[in-house]
Image (spheres, coloured by chain):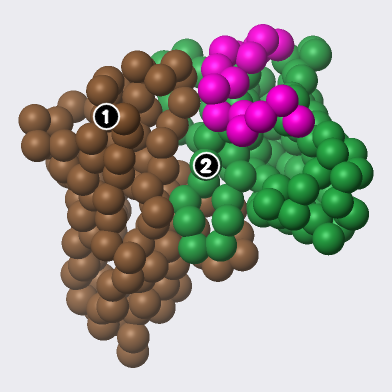
Amino acid sequence: GQNIDQPTEMTATEGAIVQINCTYQTSGFNGLFWYQQHAGEAPTFLSYNVLDGLEEKGRFSSFLSRSKGYSYLLLKELQMKDSASYLCAVRDDNYGQNFVFGPGTRLSVLP
Amino acid sequence: GAGVSQTPSNKVTEKGKYVELRCDPISGHTALYWYRQSLGQGPEFLIYFQGTGAADDSGLPNDRFFAVRPEGSVSTLKIQRTERGDSAVYLCASSPGQGRLEQYFGPGTRLTVT
């Protein structure tokens, strides 16, 4: 089957660094994606990893270890506007072309 | 151009009625996905189109749900004999294809079945 786990909630302080972890179990793997979703809005694409290692994009970085079924999203220099849910999604080629999303991690950034 | 658009933004219907939800993807995007999302959960995959054909409809919960994309652009999700459990936000996403897999989501249609 398919299973994606993320912490339900996290809290961090403005200006700090936070790491949001995602573990997955899928029979096939063809990429891991991170999305940001503000309350009441649609998810927006943040990053994509298909090979092991770190992808950096400004204040956001994402890491992947395929052998461990593990990824994290690193947010630096946190701002209040970063308060949102962060969704981890895996593309599983053994389940057609579909994407499986995790439940999301709700991040609260405090002043 | 414009992003993904969905209409209506809100739909309230009575149990047993038929509803259609529309999605206009980003122009030129070959792949189109439908998801539904309940409060506090991640999006749940329903169906994926590559061009006009449904490449994967394994997420459709039962035969009351059907989707079409006749010209490879606009898509319509159709739900027959709606049930209260169908209440959710229905999200549409498109992606460019040609090796680019990131998805661009529309604002969603909030469906409430009373």
Q: Name which quarter of the figure residue B59 lies in.
A: top right
Q: Is residue B55 magenta?
A: yes
Residue placed furthest toward the left: A67
Q: Quadrant of the N terminus of chain A?
A: top left
Q: Residue at x 89, y 54 (%)?
A: B14
Q: Residue at x 73, y 15 (%)?
A: B72
Q: Secondary structure at mark 2?
A: strand
Q: Residues within 10 Å of mark 1 (few under 14, many from 20)?
A: some
Residue B12 in the image, given as x and y percentages of width and height? 86, 57
Q: Which residues are magenta?
A: B50-64
Chain containing the residue with disc 1: A
Q: What amino acid is at disc 1?
A: Thr
- In the picture, which chain is green? B
Q: Name which quarter of the figure residue B28 lies in.
A: top right
Answer whether residue A47 is visible to the viewer in this image: no
Chain containing the residue with disc 2: B
Residue B9 in the image, given as x and y percentages of width and height? 79, 54
Q: Which mark is residue A26?
A: 1
Q: Is residue A108 left or right of residue B98?
A: left
Q: Which mark is residue A82?
A: none
Q: Which mark is residue B44?
A: 2
